[in-house]
Image (tube, coloured by chain):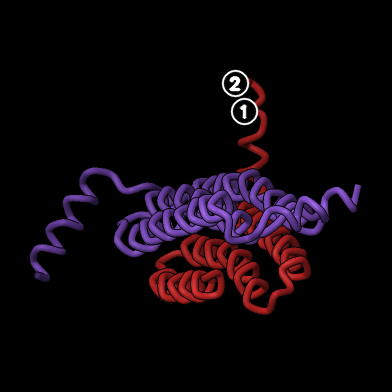
C-alpha cells in the first residue's frame, strides 16, 4: 500500500494544474476567514452591549477559525502520501472540535452573564447612548 | 508562495488582534474580558499552525494546536461556572424548584 501511495505521489507533480486549483481554493478560504475575523474585531469594539459583542464574537470567531484552518489544510496538501493525509485529517479534527466547543463556551458565558444580573440594553438606554455620542461629537 | 501566504496571514491576524486587546483592557465587565481572551485563544490555534508551516514541522505543531484549543475551551467553561456561583446560595435554592415546576 505504501508503494502504491508513493508512486502516485511521484506521478502527480506539485506544479500540475489540479494542485494549483486546490491551493488557490485554500488561499481563498484563508482570505475569507480574515474578512470574517475583521468583522469580529470591528464588532467587538463598536457594539454597545455585552450580548451584542458576544453575538459578533461567537459567530465570526467560529466561522473564521474554521475557514482559516481548512484553507491551511488545503494549502499544506502537496501529494497523496500517508503523512499528508494524516495532517489534513488532524487539521479537520481541530476544525470539528472548534465547531463544537466555541458555540458551547459562548452559550456558557452568556448564561453566566445573564444569571449574574447583567441586563441587555433596552431602547431607552440606546437613546441615551446615541445622545451621548452625538453631543460628544 | 506557501511561505508568503503564511507570513501575510499571521501578520494580519496579529494586527486584527489589537482591537480585541483593547476590549480586554477597557471592557466594562469581566465577561467582556474573558470573551476577548477566548477569541484570542481560538486564534492562537490558527497561529500555531502558521508557525508550523514556517518551521516545516506542521505535524508537530498541529498537536500543539489541538492541546491549546482544548485548554481554551476548558478555561472558558471554568470561568463561566465560577461567575455563575456569585449568585447567593439562597437565591439558587429558591430558583431550582420553580424551574422543575415549569418543566
Q: Are marks 2 and 1 in contact (CB under 8 Å)?
A: yes
User: Which shade of the palette goes to chain A?
Assistant: purple
Task: Give the percent coordinates (x, y) of residue B7.
Answer: 51, 76
Chain shown red: that is: B
Identify the element where label 2 is drawn.
helix
For this orientation, the residue located farthest to the bottom is B55
Taking depth in this image into account, of A115 and A96 the one nearest to the observer is A96
Disc number placed over residue B99 in the picture, else none: 1
Residue at 67% x, 45% y: name it.
A96
Task: Give the percent coordinates (x, y) of residue A92.
Answer: 68, 49
Taking depth in this image into account, of B35 and B40 the one nearest to the observer is B40
| Crowd band around label 2 with a 10 angstrom C-alpha radius: few (<14), some (14–19), many (20+) | few
Residue at 35% x, 54% y: name it.
A49
Disc number placed over residue B102 in the picture, else none: 2
User: In terms of image quadrants, where is residue A78?
Assistant: bottom right
| Crowd band around label 1 with a 10 angstrom C-alpha radius: few (<14), some (14–19), many (20+) | few
On screen, residue A47 versus residue B32, left or right, reads left
Check the picture and name the quadrant holding the C terminus of chain A. bottom left
Task: Give the percent coordinates (x, y) of residue B71.
Answer: 72, 63
Taking depth in this image into account, of A88 and B32 the one nearest to the observer is A88
For this orientation, the residue located farthest to the front is A11
Q: Is residue B11 above or below residue A122?
A: below
Task: Give the percent coordinates (x, y) of residue B4.
Answer: 50, 75
Amino acid at each position: 500500500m505504501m508503494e502504491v501511495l508513493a508512486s502516485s505521489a511521484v506521478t502527480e507533480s506539485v506544479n500540475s494544474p489540479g494542485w494549483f486549483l486546490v491551493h488557490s481554493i485554500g488561499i481563498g478560504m484563508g482570505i475569507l476567514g480574515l474578512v470574517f475575523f475583521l468583522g469580529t474585531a470591528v464588532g467587538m469594539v463598536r457594539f454597545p452591549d455585552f450580548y451584542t459583542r458576544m453575538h459578533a464574537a461567537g459567530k465570526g470567531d467560529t466561522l473564521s477559525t474554521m475557514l482559516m484552518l481548512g484553507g491551511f489544510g488545503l494549502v499544506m496538501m502537496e501529494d497523496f502520501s500517508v503523512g499528508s493525509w494524516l495532517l489534513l485529517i488532524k487539521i479537520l479534527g481541530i476544525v470539528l472540535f472548534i465547531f463544537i466547543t466555541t458555540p458551547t463556551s459562548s452559550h456558557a458565558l452568556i448564561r453566566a452573564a445573564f444569571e449574574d444580573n447583567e441586563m441587555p440594553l433596552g431602547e431607552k438606554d440606546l437613546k441615551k447612548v446615541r445622545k451621548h455620542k452625538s453631543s460628544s461629537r | 508562495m506557501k511561505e508568503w501566504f503564511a507570513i501575510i496571514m499571521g501578520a494580519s491576524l496579529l494586527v486584527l488582534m489589537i482591537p480585541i486587546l483593547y476590549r480586554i483592557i477597557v471592557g466594562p465587565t469581566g465577561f467582556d474580558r474573558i470573551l476577548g481572551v477566548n477569541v484570542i485563544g481560538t486564534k492562537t490555534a490558527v497561529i500555531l499552525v502558521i508557525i508550523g508551516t514556517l518551521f516545516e514541522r506542521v505535524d508537530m505543531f498541529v498537536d500543539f494546536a489541538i492541546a491549546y484549543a482544548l485548554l481554551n475551551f476548558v478555561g472558558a467553561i471554568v470561568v463561566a461556572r465560577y461567575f455563575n456561583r456569585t449568585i447567593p446560595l439562597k437565591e439558587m435554592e429558591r430558583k431550582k424548584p420553580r424551574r422543575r415546576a415549569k418543566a
